[in-house]
């Protein structure tokens, strides 16, 4: 097997007496959609913040594209091609949809010590931003304020902002959070179109979405990896059924 | 902004105000020219604070320190009979730039209330530093005997010349702020205000941009300080007390924080109110007819109605004067 694009080994994080991440090791292969599932409180979001660099691990290592990034802060990891989306929508509400995305483009077009030229007419920013918006189907909302978007559209904007950084790996923290059935289906379509183009680590509660998208699944319970495998392997795994679905599911 | 067909009420008012400023000295009224000059100089300081506070979300309660440093950059050389304006200017810019860089580098490691407190602490340190220097008058202040001379252009001894120099600096500062906030740099600053965590996640190292912004703002405010020393011919550590910083914040909020012309509106309104409320009929009536106010220092009590007015503005005119004009403009036109 080729070198995985992301490898985390023996990651640990605890908050006081609570162990949020307990010796988690996950390999994400280039090009795959790797889902991480687990009951509430399993430490999924904590794991994402450790991988994105917003929070440093107590111990363990994170390697990204063959490079040790364990001690790199979030903005440096973003530069290397690691992007995340947020479970709780985290956008710039008072700015237009286009500005939201072009800020993400800008971060990856050299430094921002440019004090004079307008950004809203700068093709170097606007064109890639529009391309990212087109990918998630928000192009015609480019001029609206982000706060005027529906919840589903804001979730799509989340993805567009992550895409605009031209990442090699997308860390998606519950992209379907709070969505209705129809909106979820739209998001699944969006992500399906990105399959093959982008490697994704997907955290999601919506099992239909996970089974529709994932190549491999890792199951996290109380901060520990219970199982990793293909969709069929995970479906058949008794440990997973016990831990995840409860005793009666087994 | 330069497309006149898209102008709304506030643009017209700001333009009218600037034209008024530009033409007023022609009236020959020295008293009001002097009041307007003070307004112009304060507006420069307020515009500089608006850049970090309004656009950048960095609520500094120590901004008056830069006015003080800028003022002493004129006053101390003048004390030694050195009136070279280029030297004054260089000292003000370098002094404020350095002070902003060092204090900003430390302050910007904190957020929220801690940032407010630490910027205030630094400005109080500057305040007490100047209070303690007996040579330059300590807390009695220092009389500035002559104004800056800008070879080969001449001096600003004439009040009208000083007025126009201040006015040009104000227009230049407003234009600079306009370019900055619409540039990539400004995008990072405003993004960091709105959602710093997201900015980091998409790859921006917000700290170094915020620090740069803080330095630019400090240097701009230093210009206001240097002009203030020339204008009032007297400087003292009081110029940089934290109460002064509080007033600057109030002018930013009053005008509409994070708007281009807010500082113009806020400073104008604040100083006009201060001027007229302290001489108003109501004020005279109150102080002359209510016994226990009779022998009070007059300037103490005009601030009471002023305070109430400001509270009303903050409560009912969100977005300050600029916000009010925007709403009123869109309702009527």
Image (tube, coloured by chain):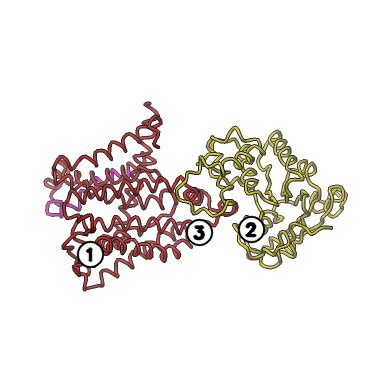
Chain colours: A yellow, B red
Labels 3 and 1 touching (C-beta < 8 A) = no
User: What distance separates the C-alpha of mark 3 from that of mark 1?
Assistant: 34 Å
Q: Nearer the viewer, residue A148 or B307?
A: A148
User: What distance separates the C-alpha of mark 2 from that of mark 1?
Assistant: 49 Å
Q: Tag 1, which secondary structure?
A: helix
What range of the chain is rendered magenta? B293-311
Chain on which label 3 sits: B
Q: Based on the displayed image, in which of its 4 quarters is residue B310 positioned? A: top left
Front disc: 3 or 1: 1
Residue at which label 2 appears: A77
Q: Give x and y (percent) for residue B88.
A: 27, 62
Quadrant for the C terminus of chain B, please: top left
Chain on which label 1 sits: B
Q: Tag 2, which secondary structure?
A: helix
Label ID, residue B75:
1
Q: Give x and y (percent) for residue A174.
A: 68, 46
- Mark 2 vs mark 3: tell me if same chain: no
Q: Nearer the viewer, residue B253 or B153?
A: B153
How many residues crowd around disc 1 within 10 Å: few (fewer than 14), some, or many (20 or more)?
many
């Amino acid at each position: 097997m080729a070198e995985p694009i992301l490898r985390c080994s023996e990651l640990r994080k605890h908050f006081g007496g609570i162990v949020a991440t307990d010796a988690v090791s996950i390999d994400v292969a280039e090009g795959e959609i790797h889902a991480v599932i687990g009951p509430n409180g399993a430490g999924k979001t904590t794991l994402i913040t450790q991988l994105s660099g917003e929070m440093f691990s107590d111990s363990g290592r994170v390697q990204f594209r063959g490079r040790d990034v364990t001690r790199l802060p979030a903005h440096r990891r973003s530069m290397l091609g690691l992007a995340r989306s947020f479970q709780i929508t985290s956008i710039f509400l008072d700015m237009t949809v286009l500005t939201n995305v072009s800020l993400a483009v800008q971060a990856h077009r050299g430094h921002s010590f440019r004090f004079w030229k307008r950004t809203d007419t700068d093709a170097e920013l606007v064109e890639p931003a529009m391309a990212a918006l087109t990918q998630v189907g928000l192009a015609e909302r480019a001029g609206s304020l982000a706060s005027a978007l529906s919840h589903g559209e804001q979730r799509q904007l989340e993805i567009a902002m992550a895409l605009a950084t031209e990442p090699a790996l997308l860390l998606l923290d519950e992209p379907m959070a709070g969505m209705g059935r129809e909106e979820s289906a739209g998001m699944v379509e969006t992500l399906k179109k990105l399959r093959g183009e982008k490697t994704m680590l997907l955290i999601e509660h919506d099992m239909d979405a996970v089974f529709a998208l994932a190549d491999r699944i890792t199951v996290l319970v109380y901060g520990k990896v219970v199982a990793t495998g293909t969709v069929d392997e995970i479906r058949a795994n008794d440990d997973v059924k016990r831990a995840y679905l409860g005793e009666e599911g087994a | 902004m330069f497309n006149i067909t898209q102008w709304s009420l506030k643009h017209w008012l700001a333009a009218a105000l600037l034209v008024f400023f530009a033409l007023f000295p022609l009236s020959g009224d020295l008293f009001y020219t002097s009041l307007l000059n003070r307004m112009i100089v304060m507006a420069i300081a307020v515009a500089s604070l608006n850049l970090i506070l309004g656009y950048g979300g960095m609520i500094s309660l120590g901004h008056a320190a830069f006015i003080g440093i800028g003022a002493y950059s004129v006053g101390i050389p003048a004390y030694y009979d050195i009136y070279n304006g280029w030297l004054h200017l260089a000292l003000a810019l370098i002094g404020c730039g350095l002070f902003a860089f060092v204090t900003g580098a430390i302050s910007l490691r904190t957020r929220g209330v801690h940032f407010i407190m630490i910027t205030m602490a630094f400005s109080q340190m500057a305040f007490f530093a100047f209070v303690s220097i007996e040579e330059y008058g300590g807390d009695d202040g220092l009389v500035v005997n002559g104004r800056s001379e800008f070879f080969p252009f001449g001096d600003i001894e004439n009040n009208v010349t000083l007025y126009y120099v201040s006015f040009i600096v104000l227009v230049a500062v407003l234009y600079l702020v306009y370019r900055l906030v619409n540039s990539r740099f400004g995008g990072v600053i405003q993004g960091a205000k709105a959602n710093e965590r997201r900015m980091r996640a998409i790859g921006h190292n917000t700290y170094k941009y915020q620090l740069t912004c803080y330095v630019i703002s400090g240097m701009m405010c230093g210009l206001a300080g240097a002009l203030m020393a020339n204008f009032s011919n007297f400087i003292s550590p009081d110029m940089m007390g934290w109460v002064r910083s509080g007033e600057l914040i109030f002018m930013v909020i009053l005008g509409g924080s994070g708007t281009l012309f807010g500082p113009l509106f806020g400073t104008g309104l604040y100083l006009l109110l201060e001027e007229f409320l302290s001489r108003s009929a109501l004020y005279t009536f109150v102080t002359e007819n209510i016994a226990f106010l009779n022998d009070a220092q007059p300037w103490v009590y005009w601030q009471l109605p002023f305070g109430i007015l400001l509270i009303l503005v903050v409560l009912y005119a969100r977005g300050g004067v600029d916000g009010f004009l925007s709403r009123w403009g869109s309702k009527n036109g």
